[in-house]
Image (cartoon, coloured by chain):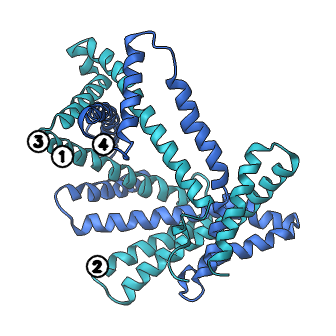
Amino acid sequence: MLENISNLVAAFLTLSIFSFLWKDNPFYRFAEHLLVGVSMGYAIPLVYKNVFIPFLYTPIFLQRQYALIFPAILGTFFIFRFNRKLAWLSRYPIVFSMGIIGMGVPLSMHASVLVQMRSAMLPIMDINSFIIFIGTITILLYFFFSKSHEGVYGKFTKIGIWYMMIGFGASFGYTVMARLSLLIGRIQFLVHDFLKLI
Amino acid sequence: MKRQIPLALVIILCFLFVGHTFIPHKISDNFYQWWLSWVRTMTSFAVVLGVMSLFTVHWGKISRRMPNWQYSIVTLGALVFTSASGFIWGTQQGTPYMWLFKNVQMPMSSTMFSLLAFYIASAAYKAFRARSPEATVLLVSAIIVMIAQVPIGMAISKWIPEISNWILNVPNLAAKRGVALGVGLGGTAVSLKIMLGIERTYLGSGD
């Protein structure tokens, strides 16, 4: 009985969202607004359980780490975002969290630049490594905007664009396949679990 | 007090974190642990901000009887009911909270994402109609990668999965590496601008 009700609810909401393919309609709007509310409502108890209890309630009230009262007060300053006169107070918790950017400078330089450069600077042993080398160089030339993309330089940047198009095409193909597998999953639910046709 | 102190705080903390990265000392590690405990304590209030923001927007729509205000009741009702069910009956398997997740939230979010399959197909068609060589390269690459993922690809030719692998491991690798280097350099430049107080948009407008 409960399974039938569950399937009915899920099927109704699935079809309500699919109805957007026809045009915007009240069923789709209802499902869309319900999704926003349920998603936010789902997050609140999880944050309470996984963040509020272990990092605020337990240390302050059970472990008596009273120094954490200060960041708790600082955290409440987020709420002043809604008050025009006191909105400046909400900058304090934001900037305190932003300190981590200092750590990001050497780490992103290492992870995204130096490691990638090291991987790119390999001996050219075969045609594939030559193709990768040319691709990396021409894409970097494309991202160098201090020189206009004209003449011989423009031809090199054009090769970079072609490389990027192949890369974007591959990512696009993967995204389409992921979305299609979700679509197959939903149709399978409607035909198999709900209508029990197959 | 309103702009200068937060700005100074960011600059000081950023330089301390640069020092923390290069100086593996107990004092440096203690500083990081202290900062982490403070940020974790503050984070739970950021969720309160999100909930209040949602409430303010939708409550405003309802109280002013704006167009389609009835749907805002659905959003707020779902928010209150779902979170209340989590607090009253718990978040473990078999509770109303998990029932809502399995039969309301999960089907709707996966259907919402699956809708994109149709719009992606229409975007691909529009790109193909543009008839530019770049759009054609993008689509040919995408079609080969897609066909290679399904059994029909192997049935058409045994070379299709081979070509797909080559695309992913050679030109795609070069593209990803070039883009990663660009993103890395750009990210470092923006971080340096924040560290040195040149980039201040995160402080928002006003005093």
Same chain shared by disc 4 and disc 2:
no
Query: Picture coordinates of residue B97 (x, y %)?
Result: 54, 60
Residue marked by disc 3:
B129
**Of the numbered discs in the image, which one, if any, rests on residue B68?**
2
Q: Tell which chain the image draws in cyan.
A: B
The span from disc 4 to disc 3 (Cα, nearest Å) is 25 Å
Q: Tell which chain the image draws in blue.
A: A
Given the image, what chain letter belongs to the residue carrying mark 3?
B
Same chain shared by disc 4 and disc 3:
no
Q: Quadrant of the C terminus of chain A?
A: top left
Q: Which type of secondary structure does the marked residue at label 1 adopt?
A: helix
Q: Is residue B2 left or right of residue A119?
A: right
Q: Earlier in the sequence, mark 3 or mark 1?
A: 1
Query: In the image, what residue type sits under mark 2?
Result: Asn
Query: In the image, what residue type sits under mark 1?
Result: Ser
- Label 4 or label 1, whichever lies nearer to me, is 1
| Quarter holding residue B22 | top right
- Label 2 or label 1, whichever lies nearer to me, is 1
Q: Which type of secondary structure does the marked residue at label 2 adopt?
A: loop
Given the image, what chain letter belongs to the residue carrying mark 4?
A
The span from disc 3 to disc 1 (Cα, nearest Å) is 11 Å
Q: Is residue A164 left or right of residue B77?
A: left
Residue at 45%, 75% in the rendered image: B76
Residue marked by disc 1:
B122
Query: In the image, what residue type sits under mark 4?
Result: Leu
In the figure, B61 relative to B29: above or below?
Answer: below
Residue marked by disc 4:
A183
Residue at 25%, 45% in the rendered image: B120
Q: Is residue B90 visible?
A: no
**Of the numbered discs in the image, which one, if any, rests on residue A167?**
none
Residue at 29%, 67% in the rendered image: A29
